[in-house]
Amino acid sequence: MPTSVIRAAIAVCRDALHWRDDLRTIFHAAGVSRQLYSRYDQPGISKARISRAIFDELHEQGAAGHTIQRKIIEELCGMRKPQADAPDQKAGAEALAELKQVAQEQRVLVDPDRAAATARQAAEKRRLQSLQERQATIGELRLEFLKLVQEDASQSAQRRGYDLEKQFARLFRAYDLDYRPSYRIAHEQIDGSFHFRGFTYLVEARWRTAQPDLGDLLDFKGKVDGKLDSTRGAFVSMAGYDPDVLDHFVRNARGSRNNVIMFTGRDVSQLFEGRIGLLDALTKKVDAAEQEGRALCEL
């Protein structure tokens, strides 16, 4: 693979892509093993450095590695324009144009437009496959959730809470969202965390017969406030919330960050029953909190 093509491809990875997950998807689709990719997909390592290191390793693999390099080039040339979230759209567009021109001149791609069409078809195939896998996962989660609902809460409340945390992790993964399972830090138990729209959300998942009181909500907010400003909270109460407690919570929270969104048992049911997608649900909740100051916006 000519050095000029590799250099142009790395520029596309740097300037035309924004999310690291998208870079990972492209490389995996081209045949890069998860083991090889994860070797360089570490905090603090940029997309350009990841790309350069993997291209170098593929070069050392000989013919098999060169084939994967070519597929990566084809995947990148299949992009019509930079991703919408890419910070410098002009730089991204120039990088794409440079790659397509150099790839054609070096005969890596005889026909970039044809390669682009092929890449779009492959992307659509992957999208449909991902959608089918997601629907299958949600179907499994629906059955598991119904079993939990039907169990005797007085005998299995704690276990149902743990099972609910596990189901959340699987649901988030089905939508390609990273979800960290429950973990413990000094004097704190965190039921889970996830990333959405540039923020980290700590999760408190409760499956109890009693609704949370004001102290429960303020304690959770204290966990959230003890982290960086980019941290928010998602409180899940299967028993719902007392309106008076919520009103007191909102009034007590004034003067500090309003940074907690809330889910009810009805919300959770709609997610696992597939009545609303996870991304749509999060968007609705977060928009209501950001634009209207509502901690609870039922789906």
Image (tube, rainbow, N blue to C red):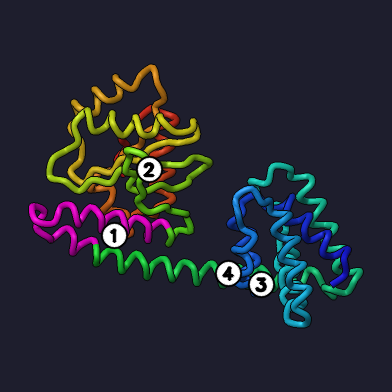
> What residue does disc 1 label?
273
For disc 2, the neighbor class at 10 Å (few under 14, some 14 to 19, many from 20) is few
Q: Secondary structure at mark 2?
A: strand
Q: Which numbered marker is on residue 34?
A: 4
Q: CA distance from mark 4 to mark 1?
A: 32 Å
Q: Nearer the viewer, residue 133 or 204?
A: 204
| Callout 3 amino acid | Ala
Closer to the observer: label 2 or label 1? 2
> What residue does disc 3 label?
30
Q: CA distance from mark 2 to mark 3?
A: 39 Å
Closer to the observer: label 2 or label 4? 2
Q: Quadrant of residue 144?
A: bottom left
- Residue drawn at (69%, 42%) of the image: 87
Q: Position of residue 230 (x, y in %)?
A: 50, 34
For disc 1, the neighbor class at 10 Å (few under 14, some 14 to 19, many from 20) is some
First to last magenta residue range: 145-172
- Residue drawn at (39%, 34%) of the image: 224
- Marks 3 and 1 in Cβ contact (< 8 Å): no
